[in-house]
Image: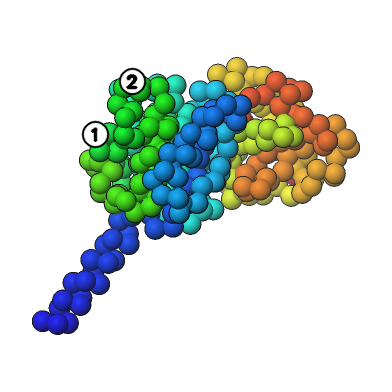
């Protein structure tokens, strides 16, 4: 009987360990910018839940209402944070409407607190959904905020994330479980068809104007192209061609003269295009998102 009791307690402790986010880390992302007090207000709410929390920023410079970029920044960042980390992502042009407020648990153990408006598109594909719960605002909402309809980042998301991160609530207490179906933004998946690589432009390297694709290095390797080989690159916006040109596949930028184009594998191990010491996106009016796509063929190996 004594051994059975010990085993029961051990199983209970294990359950609790995996039911809450233990590491007390909360990472914030938004399109608020830092010109006013919105970000600080969210952090203040979190600290009001527990001053022991560790608060960090992913970015607050998402372009206004750009749900796609919010999705990509999570995809770019979440895998590098330990299991149990809470992410609050607030890019919410539909705030106050019927869109759901959710907490997604990835298969690698991180939690994303966000409106279900497309923000979860790339995380769901890359890390997988272990579970999805709708936030029960009758329980998980900042006291006194019931009449506030336009700042769910402060009143619902930061508050819920902080309670979960601090262990005030378990994941099960966030709210009812939902089917593993999130709102998804359509885009061109990376494929190789009849010698043509197709993909999309999920994001730009905003500092330098390099154009990043979703074509990963392993798929690109199937072309068997060595460094110095020439690619023919076409870029489309809403299926309309906006750029076509040839460029070498290079290991580093300095292989080509200043101002000349090149293709390379970026830090996320994905095919990208650049101008050596120039701004490819600006010079050729290239953007990013689900409506931007690329096609690549080899002209010379």
Question: In the image, what residue occupies the spot 47% across and 47% down?
Answer: 26
Mark closer to the observer (1, 2): 1
The picture places residue 278, in percent across and down from the top left corner, at 81, 31
Does residue 75 lie above or below 296 as drawn? below
Q: In the rendered image, which quarter is residue 119 located in? A: top left
Element under disc 1: loop
Quarter of the image that includes the N terminus: bottom left
Element under disc 2: loop
Left or right, 2 with respect to 52, comes to left
Residue 108's disc number: none
Residue closest to the eye, 235 or 43 = 43
Residue at which label 2 appears: 97
The picture places residue 104, in percent across and down from the top left corner, at 36, 43
Residue at which label 1 appears: 138
Left or right, 134 with respect to 51, comes to left
The picture places residue 239, in percent across and down from the top left corner, at 56, 19
């Amino acid at each position: 009987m004594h051994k059975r009791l010990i085993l029961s307690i051990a199983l209970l402790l294990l359950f609790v360990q995996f039911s809450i986010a233990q590491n007390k880390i909360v990472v914030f992302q938004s399109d608020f910018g830092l010109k006013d007090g919105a970000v600080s207000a969210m952090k203040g709410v979190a600290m009001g839940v527990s001053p022991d929390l560790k608060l960090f920023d992913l970015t607050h410079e998402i372009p206004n209402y750009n749900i796609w970029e919010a999705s990509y920044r999570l995809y770019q960042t979440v895998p590098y944070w330990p299991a149990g980390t809470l992410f609050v992502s607030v890019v919410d042009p539909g705030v106050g409407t019927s869109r759901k407020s959710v907490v997604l648990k990835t298969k690698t153990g991180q939690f994303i607190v966000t409106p279900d408006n497309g923000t979860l598109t790339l995380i769901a594909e890359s890390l997988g959904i272990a579970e999805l719960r709708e936030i029960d605002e009758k329980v998980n909402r900042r006291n006194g905020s019931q009449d506030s309809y336009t700042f769910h980042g402060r009143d619902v998301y930061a508050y819920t994330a902080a309670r979960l991160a601090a262990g005030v609530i378990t994941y099960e207490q966030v709210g009812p479980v939902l089917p593993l179906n999130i709102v998804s933004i359509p885009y061109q998946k990376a494929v190789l068809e009849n010698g043509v690589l197709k993909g999309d432009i999920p994001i730009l390297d905003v500092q330098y104007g390099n154009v990043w694709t979703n074509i990963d290095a392993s798929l690109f390797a199937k072309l068997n192209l060595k460094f110095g080989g020439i690619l023919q690159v076409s870029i489309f916006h809403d299926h309309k061609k906006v750029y076509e040109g040839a460029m070498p596949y290079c290991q580093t930028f300095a292989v080509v003269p200043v101002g000349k184009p090149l293709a390379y594998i970026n830090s996320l191990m994905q095919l990208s295009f650049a101008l050596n010491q120039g701004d490819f996106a600006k010079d050729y009016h290239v953007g990013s998102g689900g409506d931007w796509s690329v096609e690549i063929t080899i002209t010379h190996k």
